[in-house]
Amino acid sequence: MGKLFVIEGVDGAGKNTLARRLVSAWERDGLTVVRIGFPRYDRSVHADLAAEALHGQHGDTAGSVHAMALLFALDRREAREEIRELLSHNDIVLLDRYVASNAAYTAARLEQSADGEAVEWIRSLEFERFLAPIPDVQILLDVPVALAAERASARESADAARTRDAYERDGSLQSRTSAAYGLLADSNWVSPWRIVTADVDPDRLAADLFNQPSGVRKVTP
Ligand SMILES: Nc1ncnc2c1ncn2[C@@H]1O[C@H](COP(=O)(O)OP(=O)(O)OP(=O)(O)O)[C@@H](O)[C@H]1O
Ligand SMILES: Cc1cn([C@H]2C[C@H](O)[C@@H](COP(=O)(O)O)O2)c(=O)[nH]c1=O
């Protein structure tokens, strides 16, 4: 059975970049790795609807915190069997965003703490009801919110297809999301977390993660 790793962090933190570097390091060591990014744009109607809503379509959908969280959760529900199948045939499955994204952004939008009702709602919806596979390790890429925002802005200027969505344009939401992530990581929410900073060495992180023994996975708060 392969290991399930997740990278989390605010918009523009560098998750995608770190994910690519980790995959290269593991592949160099001869491991089989599959990477999936959530939301699964162009593969899941729920992911596409969520993106469209965050760019102003579908009436007041984006205004509903719970409707948005349900769209993201349904995308993952559709993917759960694929993830299990991939874990049975590969050494590592690496996810760029997963359930904790929903927990952190939902809590932040509702201005709740990470031990509040919203995070518990997401945990029970996604892990207990939708049976999303539980990660072996969740990695928080903890970069200053201002740096992440700068990167998201620069990316928008360089690539017309990457216009910032409603969450990315909301600096206060990004700050609250960063705080929520910090609390989720500190409490090892659902499974063990590892916090890394922008200057992390991807080769070393890749080796540490693969060699870390699988812990006991908990689904209770
Ligand atoms: N370590 C780094 N040093 C310099 N620039 C970086 C670094 N990591 C990422 N970037 C740049 O920052 C921008 C955002 O990075 P990336 O797309 O990896 O972030 P992300 O966390 O996946 O973003 P999002 O969640 O918004 O999709 C990109 O233009 C990327 O090239
Ligand atoms: C998976 C997921 C994402 N979000 C948020 C995080 C981002 O601001 C947007 C879109 O994601 P992207 O990485 O910028 O493409 O949606 C969320 O709130 N809940 C989730 O489960």
Image (cartoon, grey):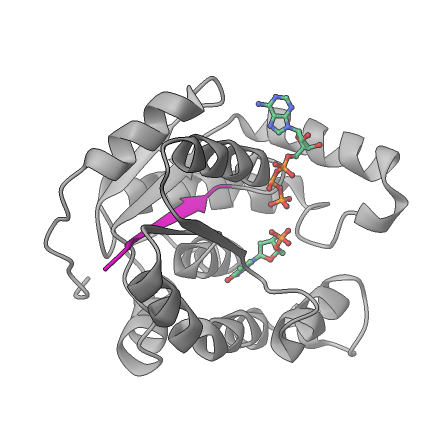
In-image side of 37 versus 187 (left or right): right
Q: Nearer the viewer, residue 102 or 207?
A: 207
Q: Return the residue found at the far left.
A: 216
In-image side of 209 versus 13 (left or right): left
Q: Quadrant of the C terminus?
A: bottom left
**In the rendered image, the vertical position of residue 171 relative to residue 219, given as above or below:** above
Q: Could you say where residue 73 lies in the image, as x and y percent from the top left? A: 48, 73
Residue at x-position 74% and y-position 53%: 165
Residue at x-position 70% and y-position 74%: 49
User: Where on the image, by quarter, is ligand 1?
Assistant: top right
In-image side of 210 versus 141 (left or right): left
Q: Could you say where residue 18 lies in the image, as x and y percent from the top left? A: 51, 33
Residue at x-position 31% and y-position 60%: 116
Quarter location, residue 47:
bottom right
Q: Could you say where residue 195 lies in the image, as x and y percent from the top left? A: 33, 32
Q: Quadrant of the N terminus?
A: bottom left
Our reading of the magenta stretch's main secondary structure is strand
**In the rendered image, the vertical position of residue 11 relative to residue 90, given as above or below:** above
Residue 207 appears in the picture as rendered: yes
Residue 163 appears in the picture as rendered: no
Quarter location, residue 38:
bottom right
Tally of numbered tags: 0
Assess whether residue 81 is covered by the magenta stretch: no
Residue at x-position 44% and y-position 53%: 104
Q: Which residues are magenta?
A: 1-9
Q: Nearer the viewer, residue 159 or 210?
A: 210
